[in-house]
Amino acid sequence: MHSVTVCGIGYVGLVTSACLSRAGHDVVAYDTDVTKISQLQHGRLPIYEPNLRELVEAQCASGRLRFTASAAEAFEACDVVFIAVGTPTTRLGDADLTYVRQAARDIAQRAVGEVVVVNKSTVPVETVDLVARLLEREGTGRARFAVASNPEFLREGSAVEDFLHPDRIVIGTDDERAAALLRDLYAEIDAPVLVVDPHTAEMVKYAANAFLAAKISFVNEIASLCDAVGADVEGVLAGMALDHRIGEQYMRPGLGFGGSCLPKDVSALAHAAREHAIEPTLMDAVLDVNRRQVPRLIRKIRSVAGEIEGTRTGVLGLAFKAGTDDVRESPSVALIEELLACGSSVSVHDPAAMPNARRTLGDRVEYAADPYDALRGAHVAIVATEWPEYRALDWRRAATLMAGTAVFDPRAALDSASLAGTNLIYIGSAHDAPGVSV
Ligand code: UDX
């Protein structure tokens, strides 16, 4: 059993805290946001994530997980600290390390004894050196520090499952004792462990996310081409996926990739390449293709359903993907902004993300109590996030509520057969449907 402190209680920090506690460790979860900590102490989670509430409750009840906003309490008695603070993108496209620096200073000033400081935030290569320098310079707590990088690969919506059953655990450190401690920390988790130097570990995370983003942009470009030549993109992708060298993961076309990681990490990698005088041709293209997906759908709406100005659009789904309440870099939100700019009124629904979306979209859209309400009077319906509840909709009922007939399904969230027997016209990423009435 180790005494673990997790610094920064966002998605990664909270899941790491709860799961390491479940693995039998004594975990203190620390954040400078007093309101967030107070909510957590009262059992209220700042994020929606399947199975997380139950896990946090159980671990708090076991006494192995507690939350604090006090740096003194957080760092005085731990043998390992995870830095899991946010690393937002700056205007220039690189990662802002303000919170990482602050965390390193807090740790240095408070920690006592031997401590392994582990970067879990996604950070540019060499950040582990920055943390080591700060610990050395600021250290007043008379601790001996070793540093490591331990990137986290969990996905929102399946974060607990991903943490407990990862494809791999990557440990980046030059310190043998730190490597041994981290191996021991993860002993309960059954996954291959890769021990490499810190820069390699930092690079693994960026390279993996950039590769996933590249796959998505690739299939989106293929989808555009399929549209143009009259090929069925779903058939094309099915044919590709049967090649076991290609597979079917991250091969779903749609509105492009969003969320707090993929767009940010590809930008940061491109920025890092430029800093090393390497032209990031592929990364730039990945981002460029991604930016084209919302305009592509807008063009499709125009060509299929006519002018957008003065119409009403019902948008189902606001989260950047199903299973989360997160709207950061959500393609759905970008789509809504574009629809508003084109002069459509928009009513929206999402099973989880409406409160977060309201912070961005304010009262410029109408928030519907249920999906049917969002479609009432709509000339055009768009399923922008692939929530399973939308697949289960009664489209006969929706048809009686809508003013128009076009249902756009860019992420292939629906079974097109469910619209059979209605006057609705299904337009997936593989379909053109001229003559739709609005
Ligand atoms: C991602 C990485 O998958 C994870 O390893 C890392 O730790 C954090 O970043 P996450 O942001 O939760 O996880 O989202 P992910 O499930 O990877 O999806 C990212 C975006 O790509 C979403 O907008 C999703 O809708 C989109 N996507 C995904 C596609 O458009 N097509 C696909 O085939 C897969």
Image (cartoon, helix red, strand yellow):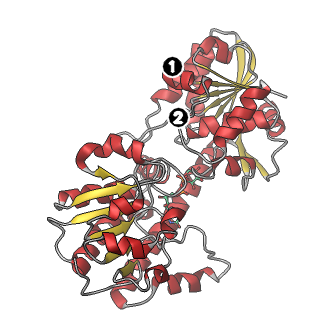
Q: Is mark 1 within 8 Å of ligand 1?
A: no
Q: In the image, residue 146 lies at what x, y percent?
A: 71, 27
Q: Residues within 10 Å of mark 2 (few under 14, many from 20)?
A: some
Q: Kindly identify the residue that appears in the image at 63 percent across and 52 percent down.
A: 158
Identify the image quadrant of the C terminus: bottom left
Q: Kindly identify the residue that appears in the image at 65 percent across and 41 percent down.
A: 52
As drawn, the label of residue 347 is none
Q: In the image, residue 210 lies at what x, y percent?
A: 52, 58
The amino acid type of the residue labelled 2 equals Pro
Residue matched to label 2: 46
Compared across the picture, whether 184 is left or right of 243 comes to: right
Q: In the image, residue 203 lies at what x, y percent?
A: 59, 49
Whether 36 is drawn above or below 198: the answer is above
Residue matched to label 1: 34
Q: Kindly identify the residue that appears in the image at 63 percent across and 8 percent down.
A: 140
Between 55 and 411, the one nearer to me in the picture: 55
Compared across the picture, whether 406 is left or right of 206 comes to: left
Q: Which secondary structure, mark 1?
A: helix
Q: Are marks 2 and 1 in contact (CB under 8 Å)?
A: no
Q: Earlier in the sequence, mark 2 or mark 1?
A: 1
Q: Which secondary structure, mark 2?
A: loop
In the rendered image, is residue 275 in sight? Answer: yes
